[in-house]
Amino acid sequence: MFILKMFGWRIDPHSPEGVKKAVVVMGPHTSNWDFIIGKVAFMQYNIKGTFLIKKELFFWPLGWFLKVIGGIPVDRKSNNNFTDQAVDYFNNNETMFMVFTPEGTRSYSPNWKKGFYYIAQKANVPIYIGYIDYKKKIGGFYPTLFQPTGNSDADIASIKEILSKYEGRFPENGIFTVEDDAKRALKESK
């Protein structure tokens, strides 16, 4: 897309062709710019990425804007659990690419939120790994679909291994392998 090219960025040519539904794990998430670059990339792929956000933010005019950019309201106070609400969206839509940043913050976080994993399992959809690399100015989809095995810790370690190869805008806040997370924790505890 012209806007990204103007700033020296390119989009990975691998696209999720033939896949209609998937959880997308994006990383590393270290800057607010990640969302903008990701949104433009999704437009180039001709995919409408969606993301879950608490329903309290869906008031006029913010709610309208959030829906336009792919926001889906979820009721965090209802008796329905968050995972079930997300699975319902998958079940009620013919196409759905639900995007998650499992770090849950733009700061360094070795402990990922696992909701994306349980949603993929329960909705019986694959996980796509989306990445952004500020050093090489490229972003997009990792070429291989990831099928959850049921071992969340091992699968998340594998996803971290893949995403650790990419550099966020603030590399110190990026994603590291499980082993590197442990080394970093040990070093910080001294």
Image (tube, grey):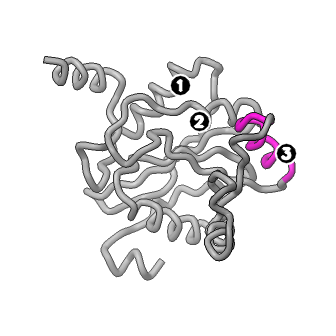
Callout 3–callout 1 Cβ contact below 8 Å: no
Amino acid under disc 3:
Asn
Residue on which the image places disc 3: 91
Look at label 1 and name its amino acid: Asp
146 or 168, which lies in front?
Answer: 168
Earlier-in-chain disc, 3 versus 2: 3
Circle 1 sits on which residue?
155
Who's the residue at 50% across and 61% down the image? 13
Q: In the rendered view, tell whether residue 159 sits above or below residue 149.
A: below
Whether label 1 touches label 2, CB < 8 Å: yes
Tell me the number on the disc at residue 146: 2
Magenta span: chief secondary structure = helix
Tell me the residue at 57%/22% (across/down).
152
- Residue 142's spot in the image, x, y percent? 49, 47
Q: Residue furthest right?
A: 92
In the figure, 86 relative to 137: above or below?
above
Quadrant housing residue 115: top right
Q: CA distance from mark 1 to mark 2?
A: 9 Å
Q: Which residues are magenta?
A: 80-92
